Image: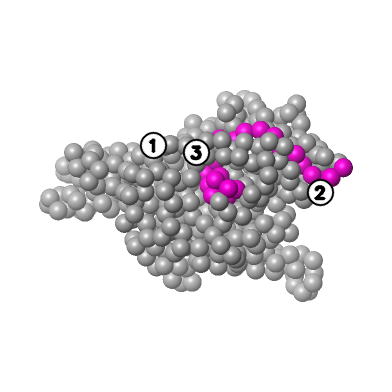
Amino acid sequence: MINFEIPADLQAQQQLIEMVAKQAMRPYSRQLDENEHARPKVFFDMTWPFTSNMVRSEIKALKKQLNGANGSNGSVAVKDKPRVNKAILALILMIEQMSWGDTGQYLCLPHPMLGGAAVNSAGTVEQRIRFLEKFSKGEPKWGAMAITEPGAGSDNSSMRTTAILDEETNEWILNGEKIFITNGKLALDESDGLCVVWATVDPKAGRAGIKSFVVEGHTPGVTIAKQEHKLGIKASDTVALHFDNVRVPYENLLGSAEVRQKVSSKGFAGAMKTFDASRPAVAASAVGIARAAVEFTHERLAEEGIVPDYTKSLHEMTAVERDLMEMESRWKGAWLLTLRAAAQMAHGESNRLEASMCKYRAGEAVTWITQKAVELLGPLGYSRELLVEKWMRDAKINDIYEGTRQINQLIVARSILGYSRRELK
């Protein structure tokens, strides 16, 4: 039987995150929206102790896994009972609740974030421990991931950022430009964080030449080329990064010894696993915004005496009641798909199809739901007096980043129909 109850040990965390969303996020939402690039200091101060503790717990589990693999404690993994990674469920629940509070602030959470997802997907256990440890102590730090380029968005094979090995110093030299990087300034310019940069070691090799490199905060040669002004998520730090002869240690190339070969398709495959982890996270964020819009619309319409009667059939309802029902249906359907993709990841199963399904559905749902909320609430919904119009602007990005709706449709279709990338474009 499927159980949708939140595990008891995560319920206390949920209560804490709900308090953060209500007290440190929602009250500052409008102010930060109208003062783009201002830092949510209250949010940083309240969340860093919690997120750094989460990372410490993850590191502890990784060290236990490493010791077990090395046989130092004599433990043997039981194949019939694989360990369920509850940290994944905890993160998904946290993202949904924080995005209900304010998705722009959530996106600049002091945490490894997308950079951590890339390290976890492409790095070895030793690398994961080494890079995550900096997020477990000291001052707040941020993680970022740099993939998109001016000429390489959905088609990563046209990536032009290069990584050349200097054999004398055993360092990689990175040159190129990345755009639309979430937390890029916070990670590299304002803290001792990290950014996972995708670059090619052989442009002629296409995807096989692409690998992931960890660039740490304050590394010489990294500059902020542009800070974006956006439609929504204005509290979020979004920048373009320029890499000019940036030197990173050889061991900052993510992956096993086999992946470190000059050209290997396994390097790109390992990096692509990042999306299997990040897409459910984006979907969870979309669901959080959708829930905020659904709940608020219900509350405001109830004040006017409009309360759906769930015992009626659809043809007996008013148009507004049917719209409310449809909003709820799309929101809850997207959440179930998201939980499914997260559960597969937590059990160590491949979730490539499900990750794209939930990302596609949640992005589509939140876009429609927030637009419908503005419509049902009329002029007030369109005004800045309420946060509904802000949620509509915030929502659209979930339909775009980490793979657009169209790209995820292609991935779903290829997976279900058994077509290759060349056969179905």
> Which residues, given as a range, are shown in magenta?
168-189
Amino acid at dot 1: Leu
Judge depth for marks 1 and 2 and give the one in front: 1
Give residue 349's position: percent from left, percent from top.
61, 53
Query: Quick one: label 1, few (<14), some, or many (20+) residues within 10 Å?
Result: few
The image quadrant that residue 420 belongs to is top right
Query: Quick one: label 3, few (<14), some, or many (20+) residues within 10 Å?
Result: some
Residue displayed at 76% across by 64% down: 69
- Give the residue at mark 1: 231
The stretch drawn in magenta includes residue 238: no
Amino acid at dot 3: Gln
- Give the residue at mark 2: 257
Label located before the other in sequence (1 or 2): 1
Q: Which mark is residue 227?
A: 3
Label located before the other in sequence (3 or 2): 3
Whether residue 47 is visible to the viewer of this picture, yes or no, is: yes
Do the numbered discs 3 and 2 sit on residues whose CB atoms are within 8 Å? no
Query: Quick one: label 2, few (<14), some, or many (20+) residues within 10 Å?
Result: few
Left or right, 105 with reference to 424: left
Do the numbered discs 3 and 1 sit on residues whose CB atoms are within 8 Å? no
Amino acid at dot 2: Ala
